[in-house]
Image (cartoon, grey):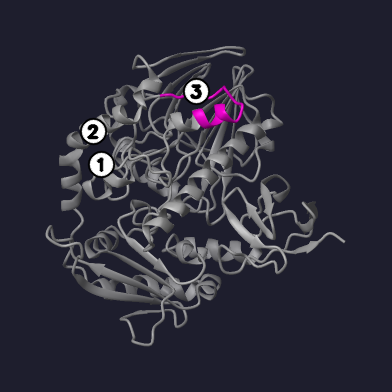
Amino acid sequence: MRITGTGHASLFVETTIGSILCDPWVNPAYFASWFPFPDNSQLDWKQLGQCDYLYVSHLHRDHFDAKNLAENIRKDTTVLFPDFPTSSMEDELRALGFSNLQRLPNEEVVDFGSGVKMMIQAMTAPTDGPLGDSSIWIEDNGLRVLNQNDARPAELAVFAELGPVHAHFLQFSGAIWYPMVYDLPEAAKRTFGKQKRERQLDRSLRYVEDLKAQWVFPMAGPPCFLDDELWHLNDIFEDEGNIFPDQQVFADFMADQGHDNGVVLLPGSVAELNEDSLEVEHPVPDVRDFFLTENKRKYLEEYRERQRPVIAAERQSWSHPEIDVLAVMQQRFEPIMDQADQMAHGIGGPVLFELTGPRPEESDDPPLLEEVVFDFTTRKIRRPDPADKPRYRFRMQRRLIESLLHTEEEDWVNHLFLSARFEAKRIGQYNEFVYTFFKCLTDERVNYVEGWFAEQQPDAEDIELDGWVIQRRCPHLKADLSRFGEIEGDTLQCLLHGWKFDLPSGKCLTSAGHELRSSRVE
């Protein structure tokens, strides 16, 4: 089996029955904040687009690149489609001209003939991507590959049971806005970033140790940030709190933990995978040298200069001053809030949006143009009231909201929040219902999520862990705490997503709700 690295989470896999192009992301995403790293625009995407099969794992725009899909991928290719609960991704693919969609039943092996089998695992919790994420498993005459990309299943047993895996591709780096956008002292932000960096490396290592694949390929990150306003997010400043470590960092981390089977692919790297060997050819003489900080910084500086016109054009497209932001929000989103019983109860108060103008060159403070409150108590969108005590405050340029309203975007998390082009402040614990609501700005989405929350039942199975009896499944997303649980003192941390619980009380320390059943061993 031949596997060509095509950048970020993208792979070109050649099998007995033809080629499979996975997650072909090239163009900047999230208001031109994310760019593929390394740059993969020099690849022959017209040729890659002649693939026999297309697999897009989910709708995050660093995986679902509508422009590349529209311009370069043949429309009669067979699209291997995850069994998602909402129609958003299918609707977007069909709108781009793809008609041959083959939906694979969730976690069922499908025989494609000539010794090739495939299986897609669809993740469908509200926190999985934009209401859906997935992994694909491919077997070609005894050679097995798992492309896990961003997906975070509670366990990998469903893949391990199908036989030894020869190549495991997985995410390891940050794909979130925390803690960088929060209004925190720099020392606290650095501490929280360091914890986040360590957690995500540790989580990925647990997947590696779970599956025990012959070769492990770090992928699906990190992006790079070429806009001057976001340049500080690149991991080139020896900042231990940076949540975007690169591929070589994870390969070295694996080696430090006793796993020397990490393999880094660059765009254009070709891996010849056999049952007992792997041969890789790279487009550069020395991959490790490519990732040295001084070389990486120089590479990014040159990349930034090439992309300045692209970023400038993107910025020009954001402004739509003709839009009455408050009126459009009221018309479009108040009916959604009326249906969001569980999320509104979970948020339980006002969420404030402070909308600013562009930042003047001579000032650090952009002018405040408008304020809008999403009041989840009354289910109304209105102007602020002096009595308001919003637990969440978001501050961003008004033209970003104008753009979202102009395009009728149904998922602000997938566009606005991942851009990191905002500042957040909260009082108290993290509240996952806030961000979940802003993924659900259509009737279909809000009804699916409300139903999902309503169906969650308490977990009846208990385990013993370090002197405590606790429920086996994490209250957050049902991770198996016998594998992902770690106790320090009276605190339990689920390492899959980093959530913490106070064991004597069962209280969740990370977010409102989500109590844990726990007691000391008698």
Q: Which of 245 and 482 is in front in this view?
A: 245
Q: Are marks 2 and 3 in contact (CB under 8 Å)?
A: no
Report crowding for label 2: few under 14, some 14 to 19, many 20 or more residues within 10 A (C-alpha): some
Magenta span main SS: loop
The answer to which image quadrant residue 460 occupies is bottom right
Circle 3 sits on which residue? Answer: 263
Q: Position of residue 392 (x, y in %)?
A: 41, 70
The amino acid pointed to by label 3 is: Val
74 above or below 229?
above
Circle 2 sits on which residue? Answer: 303
Q: Position of residue 376 (x, y in %)?
A: 45, 77
Q: Position of residue 20 (x, y in %)?
A: 46, 26
* Secondary structure under the numbered disc 3 in the rendered image: loop
Circle 1 sits on which residue? Answer: 226
Could you tell me which residue is drawn at 17 percent across and 36 percent down?
A: 305
Q: Do the residues labelled 2 and 1 touch (CB within 8 Å)?
A: yes
